[in-house]
Amino acid sequence: MEVALQVQDITVRYGGFTALDQIRLELARHTTLGLVGESGSGKSTLARVIAGLITPDEGQLLLGAEPLGKKRSKAQHKQIQMIFQNPDSSLNPRHTVRQILAEALLFHRIVERSQVERRSKELLSRVQLDAKSLDRYPHEFSGGQRQRIAIARALSVEPSLLIADEPTSALDVSVQRSVLELFHTLQAELNLTMLFISHDLGVIHAVSDTVAVMRQGQLVEVNSKDEFFVRPQHEYSRELLSAVPKMPQY
Amino acid sequence: MTIQPVLELEELTLAAPSTEILVNSISFSLERGESLGLVGESGSGKSLTLRAILGLLPRGVEQTGGVVRSKVSSAMVFQDPRGALDPLCPVVKQLTEVVYYRQRTSLKAARRIALELLERLGLPASLKTKDRYPGQLSGGQCQRVVIALALACKPGILLCDEPTTALDVTVQRQIIDTITSLQQELGFAMVFVTHNLAIAANLCSRLVVMKQGRIIEQGETHSLLRHPAEAYTQMLMDSVLPLPELEGGGVSWK
Amino acid sequence: MNTTQIDTTLPDLGKPASGLRRVLNTPSLLIGIIMFTILILLAIFIPYLSPYNPTEQNLSAFLQPPSAAHWLGTDQLGRDLFTRLIYAARTDLTIMVLAEIIPFCTGVMLGMISGYYGKWTDRIIALVTDTFIAFPFYLIVIIVAFASGAGERGIYITFILVGWIVFARVVRGLSASFRKQEWIASAQTLGLPGHRILLRHLLPNVLPQAVVVLMTDMIGLLVAIVTLGYLGIGIAPPTPDWGTMIADGQPFITTAWWLSAVPGFAVVYTGIALSLLGDGLADIWRRKG
């Protein structure tokens, strides 16, 4: 299978604390890797390293065959996009949806200026939002809707890798469900390659093809989804899985 | 003769001054030693109901109708354990003060009771010799201290407002196990607010489902989950995403 | 997975409140605007409103009490007090606005750079601001005024030197807190260069707060201009200025108290107008969320 991204021995230290300890990971094209771990396990740090927001102390990233340097080119930036956890702060409060989408589309020259409006509407319909949303500000939307706008923005530049960092954790359960369904639809329609981070094993089960488990800055296990949820290799994975509250079966 | 309930809510209505009704005419009762799950999404009014029982409504919210009848005292465990502790006071000292004032013992006895409580809640024994500030404990440990603080008031009813939502899943599991065993030991009644129906189903014998300030369904846990009358209840049940059975089994719930 | 309904409907906000309606709903802003507009209109149209020249002396009609011909009376040189008062507003308000432009722009820019980039840029800027803050403001003003010669130039130079600090401090704090927010991270993920994030993303978010500070700061500057005039190291006579007017009226405080009181009142009036403006703007921006 074609490899979209290789993480090679990435280490990040803050002072004496090792946030990421020699992480080695491969992400196959057109698949979703679910990254689980508890708070402080380093999963968000890894996401930010891959997105280029944090420079690692050691190790390197390969996007396809191309190494990602300390300073990324514009084209490299375009390839990796990220969706963040908190829908309240992931959109600039003083930009309308139109400005948010247009900036991404024009900066990376995805379409001509005259085509921006049409493409923005297409993107909104892709994330099941009304075209009337274009001239509204983020605070006029619900949390789930804001998360859809963030998804539309990330998809607008046609990235080859999409990182979603706990995109549903701050949402109400019914909204969480509909956002997950949207991810499902997008995976099927766009053949996305995705790194999906969550502490919620139910969510990971719903979206992933492969599961990776992190604990205290180290990668504990990488396994196919079907194997992982039934026969986890590592004791810690088993501990995590058995701690998940389940509905009684009738 | 029926058993006297320890807590009764009758047609309780809460509203903000802008005439917006936040909790609309809800009624339920709680018996001695019983645990009741109050489930719903944000904005359903479940946390406000809990605060009304405790008698601590947030500023700007008023009780405009109905009654809350309670024969016993209640104490609350909050969602954010760090926010519920005084960051500038070491935890044993905080707990000792609460025991001292609520149980009216000598300071020395209060400290002994406090240390016993902390031990029972599974906090490290090193606290006996070296007290720590809340910032020096993990989230789960802080929540244990908060539960100890609540129990130090010897409550007849323990009110829990999403006590595990901010915690990791393994820690959540431990805290819930702790609450369950303490309840069996001490016999307090409990109202447990959560949006996670799986937790409520495992912990509570009766469920109250709230939506937009109203109770839409209530009943005994197992019959309610077997035959939910409302689509909303079904939606909450579906929102607990299924996981396949773990081979070899984990430690099963309950 | 069975389908659930999706929150595609937009919340109905009613008609979005227009700018005018928001202003009308904010009494402090409305009153501030009215007060300030009256002052500005008077200052602009005073040559057409008054038959008198503000600097022309008429020694046959000195120290007259208010009358129909001279609404606020005349001063010790027989000049019409009302005319001088409004011409002084022209002088003082013009200097006030001009002296704020450069400090406001540099302060906001340096504050954003300092808060957004952090690290060594932040350390240098913090060092400079802390050093300047250690000196009393008026001490610096008086030193510069003497060094550069009395008059407008001293005020402009002083303000270019120290006026930016208050904006830099406020904007630095705001920028540092915005920098941690995820919309900045997503702009970085998009690959936007730093200057573009500063100007297109950060600036619109820090500007409202900076403008509110500007209003308060202008009051301080106005008081400084008037104080210097009063001390005789500000605007040089015969150019009308509230500070020199107060000083000139002082010998006659028992016989013609209004000579000093009226320009004093004008300073207070302008101060109230500006602080109402600032408060009102802050209110509106807060409500907008």
Image (cartoon, coloured by chain):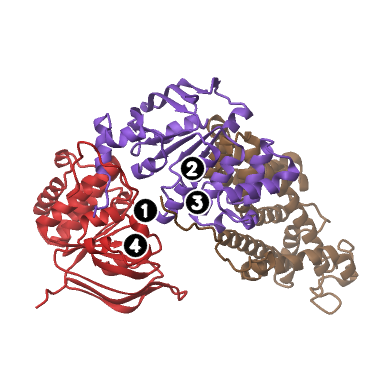
Instruction: Check disc 3 and give the amino acid type.
Output: Asp
Q: Nearer the viewer, mark 1 or mark 2?
A: 1
Chain B on-screen colour: red
* Residue of label 1: B239
Q: Quadrant of the C terminus of chain C?
A: bottom right
Give the brown chain's letter.
C
SS class, disc 2: loop
Same chain for marks 1 and 2?
no
Q: Which of the two discs, 3 and 4, sits closer to the camera? A: 4
State the purple chain: A
**Subunit under mark 1:** B
The answer to whether one can see residue C162 in this image is no
Residue under label 3, please give it: A88
Question: In the displayed structure, does residue C42 sit left or right of residue B109?
Answer: right
Q: Indicate which disc residue B233 carries.
A: 4
Residue type at the position of mark 1: Ser
Residue C215: where, in percent of width, then height? 65, 56
Give the Cα separation between the discs numbered 1 and 2.
Answer: 21 Å
